[in-house]
């Protein structure tokens, strides 16, 4: 007898892989500058993500920009033109830092010049929960 080739496509009883990635919520509130309160991002334009991103500390005095900290919580924004008001630093090692367009408070986050995505650190911005 010829060996029968039985197609055994194991259809494992619909392992309903519920998308539990509901983590990626959009920002519900307006994002404003902590310092001057100008609007940086409108609601539903950024996605909450958790990722370690290193940023220089907010420099209070000039010339102390070498100190960095690692931040975990960010808003991912696909297109820099989504922002209402945003300033950008010069490119440093492939990254641009985001600063408030009005008062230059920052860095608020960074943009990878290759990806075009940018990341706003939640620690550096204010979510305006207006009624
Ligand atoms: Zn500002």
Image (cartoon, rainbow, N blue to C red):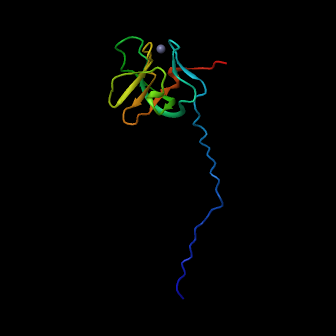
Say which of 98 and 66 sits in front.
98
Q: Which quarter of the rendered picture does the C terminus lie within?
A: top right
Q: Which residue is rendered at x = 66% and y = 61% of the image?
A: 13
Pinpoint residue 52: horizontal percent, then vertical percent: 47, 33
Pinpoint residue 92: horizontal percent, then vertical percent: 33, 27
Pinpoint residue 122: horizontal percent, then vertical percent: 53, 25
Q: Which residue is rendered at x = 36% and y = 12% of the image?
A: 62
Q: Which residue is rendered at x = 57% and y = 76% of the image?
A: 6
Pinpoint residue 2: horizontal percent, then vertical percent: 52, 86
Say which of 103 and 107 sits in front.
103
Q: Is residue 75 left or right of residue 15?
A: left
Q: Is residue 61 left or right of residue 18?
A: left
- Quarter holding residue 30: top right
Q: Relative to 25, does residue 97 appear above or below in the rendering?
A: above
Q: Which residue is rendered at x = 40% and y = 36% of the image?
A: 115
- Quarter holding residue 21: top right
Q: Relative to 90, does residue 78 appear above or below in the rendering?
A: below
């Amino acid at each position: 007898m010829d060996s029968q080739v039985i197609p055994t496509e194991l259809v494992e009883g619909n392992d309903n892989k519920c998308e539990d990635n509901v983590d990626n919520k959009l920002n519900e509130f307006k994002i404003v500058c902590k310092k001057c309160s100008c609007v940086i991002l409108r609601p539903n334009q950024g996605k909450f993500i958790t990722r370690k991103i290193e940023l220089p500390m907010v420099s209070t005095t000039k010339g102390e920009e070498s100190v960095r900290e690692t931040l975990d919580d960010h808003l991912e924004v696909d297109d820099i033109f989504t922002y209402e008001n945003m300033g950008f630093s010069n490119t440093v090692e492939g990254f641009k830092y985001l600063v408030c367009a009005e008062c230059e408070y920052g860095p608020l986050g960074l943009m990878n010049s290759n990806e075009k995505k940018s990341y706003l650190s939640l620690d550096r911005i204010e979510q305006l929960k207006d009624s």
